[in-house]
Image (tube, helix red, strand yellow):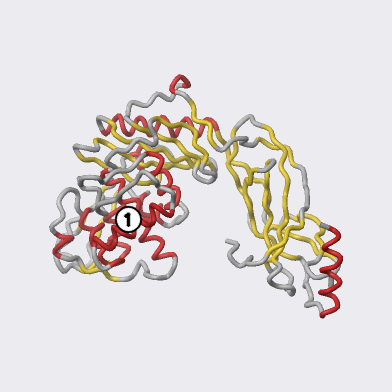
Amino acid sequence: MFNKLKKITSFVLILTIMSPLLAKNTFAVSEDSGTKVEAKSALLMEPISGKIIYEKNSNEKFAPASVTKIMTMLLAMEAIDSGKISLADKITCSENAKKMGGSTMLLDTGEIRSVSDILKGIAIASGNDAAIAMGEYLAGSEEAFVKAMNQKAKDLGMKNTTFKNCTGLPAEGHLSTAYDIALMSRELLKHKDILKFTGTYMETISEGRKTPIELVNHNKLVRFFKGCDGLKTGYTQEAKYCISATATRDGVRMLSVIMGAPTFKIRNRDAGILLNHGFSMFEGKKLLKKDQELGEIKSINKKNKAFIAKVKEDLNVVMEKGQNGELTNKIILDESKNEFLAGEVVGKCEVYCGEVLVGQVEIYTDRDIEKPNIFDKLKFKITNSFNR
């Protein structure tokens, strides 16, 4: 959000707020707390902060099955959101994609479908043919795409993950962990449009086909668990039943990962237990309101002595219930520019609890900030060096 802040300096405006706050980044609970999970491995995360609430064998390696496709979707969404491709772009299904076994969206060799349709095939029907088609479209071949998947896993800190394909079909050494899956799931959730696909229970694709493609989501929690809108299930005989499930209620989003459940019912039950546990512990809070005044701030350049900083958008955060903490706001101004019009973004406001960053939001000025002359700049630098 703040890539434009290439050169920044901090002007701290301390505003004290008493509010429930999470004190630690990780506080995994034991199974004695009523969150007993039958699956071999599990993890519950609050995805905004990355706080781990529950874990069981979360760093033990298992076959991830079609949960692998979270990485396939992540690379696709990055390409879409960066403008490299669009949802309307056309993908031609290759013979290699057509011959994929396991779950498919029933693509024919040479069939041309939009990126949007292929994403539906991956997210809803867990189509191996769709995953291969997407990988080939983005990287030229599945092999090249798998290299990109492993590089992205490395970039995300997924230290115990190795991808051998983009489908999750059984392959020696194709392994991941509940913790690593949570990392890539959390990253995928940053691309909010993906939930339009993963949160769809049924879809029909009929354009250009004699026989429509009927897609039904493998993730039944989307239909039967309140607030569930993703992300991906998986099953092979080796992996057993896996899922990375996310849901949102009352402004709180939770992410649970289950690996190695003996049945799909136990997988879904375990995922639901963890999600409900997370919702019982956390609540959404609005810390700053859109257009809220944060007080009078020293001008960036001293040509104008001060301006009123205002919040551009609501700042909503997720906090642990029943915990109190002191919050402070820190204003960081953009020093790469020294002239702003009223209403223009001039920096950001970071909200901290002690040393922990809780959230941040852009701020704008209530008045024009004029460009200073050379003497104003010199005076500002000298004065500011003594004020820090």
Q: Nearer the viewer, residue 343 or 329?
A: 329
Q: Secondary structure at mark 1?
A: helix
Q: Nearer the viewer, residue 218 or 325?
A: 325
Mark 1, residue position: 72
Extreme top residue here? Answer: 32
Q: Is residue 312 left or right of residue 132?
A: right
Q: Quadrant of residue 319?
A: top right
Q: Is residue 59 left or right of residue 373?
A: left
Q: Is residue 147 left or right of residue 358?
A: left
Task: Name the residue located 37 percent from the left edge and 69 percent from the top edge.
Answer: 86
Q: Quadrant of residue 263?
A: top left
Extreme bottom residue here? Answer: 373
Assign the C terminus to one quadrant of the image: bottom right
Pinpoint residue 165: horizontal percent, then vertical percent.
24, 53
Above or below residue 295? Residue 28 is above
Assign the N terminus to one quadrant of the image: bottom right
The crowd level at tag 1 (other Cα within 10 Å; few <14, some 14-19, many 20+) is many
| Amino acid on which disc 1 is placed | Thr
Pinpoint residue 255: horizontal percent, then vertical percent.
44, 41
Q: Nearer the viewer, residue 172 or 140?
A: 172
Q: Is residue 343 left or right of residue 103?
A: right
The number of callouts visible is: 1
Pinpoint residue 140: horizontal percent, then vertical percent.
26, 68
Pinpoint residue 335: horizontal percent, then vertical percent.
71, 68
Task: Name the residue located 60 percent from the left edge and 62 percent from the top edge.
Answer: 2
Q: Nearer the viewer, residue 25 or 251?
A: 25
Task: Name the residue located 64 percent from the left edge and 43 percent from the top edge.
Answer: 356
Above or below residue 279? Residue 213 is below
